[in-house]
Image: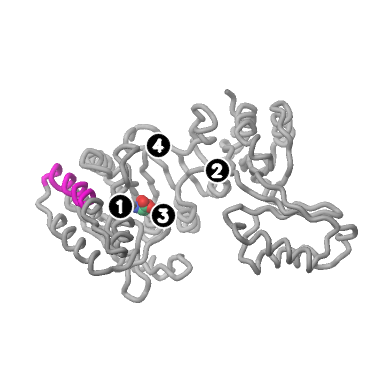
Amino acid sequence: MDRIVAKFGGSSVADSRQIGKVKAIVDADPRRRIVVVSAPGKRQAAEAKITDLLYLCYDMANMSTDICEPFGLIRDRFAEIAGALHLSSAVPDEIDQFGKKLLRGCSRDFAASRGEYFSARLIAEYLHADFVDPADYLLIRPNNTIDPASYLKLGDRLSDPGALYVIAGFYGHDGNGEVKTFSRGGSDISGAIAARAAGALLYENWTDTSGILMADPRIVDNPKTIDEISFREIREMSYMGASVFHDEAILPVQEAGIPICIKNTNRPGDPGTRISPQLSEQTIAETEVAGIAGRRNFSMICLEKTLMNKEVGFAHRLLGIFREQGVNFEQCPSSIDAISVIVDDANLQGLEEIIIAQIQQQLLPDKLYIEKNLALIAVVGEGMVRTVGIAAKTFTALKNGGINVRVISQGASEMNIIIGVSGDDYEKAVQSLYAAFVGQ
Ligand code: ASP
C-alpha cells in the first residue's frame, strides 16, 4: 500500500487536545502509517516551547543553578498529556530520571532531543503505534547532513506496510553513540528523511497555518495561500525569507520526487499547499508568480576601478577575500568598471574592516564604499520564463510606489527577479508588488 508520512509540528502536539486532533487525522486516512512528531510547542503566544525550556535547563544546570522551575514546567506539560489521554505510561518517571541526568551532566543535544523523544513515546502509546527512536537509525554527519546509508537503515525499520509507526523528530546520532540534533525546526528534516526512507507517496507537514502564503502576512493584509508550488520555487521563496518550513527539509524529498503537502491540524479540511516536483502545464500557464518574498539587513560592498573588465581574475580575487573570511555572498552585480558584493549583515559581523582593508590592499580600487540597510526582494515564479511583461510589471509597480531600485538581478533559470531596495522602502515595495501581481 502507498503510505503517507505525516509530520506534526510543535503546535500540533502542544497538549492533549491537539494530540486528539492528531489521532483524528491519522485515523481519517489508512495510508497515514508513519507519523513524525516535534516536541510540544506553545499553547499560547506567551508560553515557552518545550525545546526552549530544555535548552534553558541545560544552561542552568551547567551553571549549577537550580533548574526546578523550568524543569517543573516540562514535567507538567508531559504529565498533562499523559493524564488527559489516560496513558499509564512510564514516561513521567523517565522524565524525573532525565532531570537527574541533566544535573549529573549530559550533552546539550541530548537534553534538547528529549522533547521529541518523550513526545513521540506518549503519542505512540496513545495511537497504539510502534515507537521508533531515530538515534538508532539516522547518522547525522559533522556538516549536519544525513549519511545516505541511514535511508536504508530507517527504511528497513519501517518495512511493515500494515504497521503504524511514530518517530521522534529533530535528532539522530553522531556515529560515536551520542545523540545529535539538527538545527532548530529540524523535525521537518526528520519527516522528509522518513518519507524518503519509506518511499512514501506523500510527505504531509501538519502545522498551524493552512499552507504557504504568497507574501509575508506581517506586511501584506491577508495574503492568499499558494495552492501549488514547485520544489524549485519553494527553495527560492524560503531562501529569500518566506517562513515555509525548514529549507534543508526539501532536498531529501525533492531528490526522491515525493510531493509535500502543508496542512493545518486545526482545519484539516482546508486544502493546504502542495509542493510538487513538477508543476502542471496548467498551473504554470495560470500563475504569473508563485509568491513574493524578501529579507532585510544586507550590505553592499561596492568597488569602482577603471578598466577592471580587462584585469583577468579580478572578480575571482575579490570573492576570494570573502571566502578567506568565511563570508558567503548573496549577489554580485557588476558593470564595466564597477562590481558590488551583497552580503547578509549577520555574516559580515566583525569582519567588515578586515575585508575592506584586504580589498584596498589587493585590488587597488579607485573607489570603495559600503552601502548599508539594503533589502532584497524576490518575485518568484516558474512561469515567468515564458511570460512576457513580468519585469515590466515589477518595475512599474515599484515606480508607482515611488520606490528607488538599487539592484536588479535575474538568475539564469529565470525563476525569479531579485530587486534590492533601501530597507526603509522594503514594506512598501512588497505591498506594491503584491498589489500588482495578486491584487489588493
Ligand atoms: N523542537 C525543535 C525546535 O523547537 C525541532 C522542531 O520542532 O522541529 O526547534
Foreground mark, 4 or 3, reads 3
Q: Which residues are magenta?
A: 72-86
Q: Residue furthest bottom?
A: 176
What residue is shown at x 56% (from left), y 49% (from top)? 239
CA–CA distance between discs 2 and 4?
22 Å
User: Which is in the foreground here, disc 1 or disc 3?
Assistant: 1
Question: For mark 3, what is the residue?
Answer: 184
* Mark 1 burial class by Cα count in 10 Å: few <14, some 14-19, many 20+: many
Q: Nearer the viewer, residue 194 or 242?
A: 242
Earlier sequence position, callout 1 versus callout 3: 1
Where is mark 1, residue-wise? Answer: 53
Callout 4: SS: loop
Task: Look at mark 2 in the image and give the residue it sits on.
Answer: 279
Q: Ligand 1 near label 4 (Cβ, under 8 Å)? A: no
Image side of residue 228 versus residue 289, left or right? left
Is residue 256 visible in the rendered image? The answer is: yes
Question: For the residue marked with disc 2, what is the amino acid?
Answer: Leu
Q: Which residue is mark 4?
A: 209
Tag 4 near tag 3, CB within 8 Å: no
The question of residue 18 being in magenta is answered with no
Which quadrant would residue 400 be assigned to in this image? top right
Question: Where is residue 77 shown, x and y percent of the image?
Answer: 21, 47
CA separation in Å, label 2 and label 1: 41 Å
In what element is the residue under mark 2? loop
Please state the horizontal and vertical placement of residue 422, each as a whole percent of the image. Answer: 68, 39
Of callouts 3 and 2, the N-terminal one: 3
- Mark 2 vs mark 4, foreground winner is 4
Residue drawn at 58 percent across, 46 percent down: 240
From the top left corner, tell me how far across and down residue 19 is, in percent: 24, 43
| N-term-proximal mark, 4 vs 3 | 3
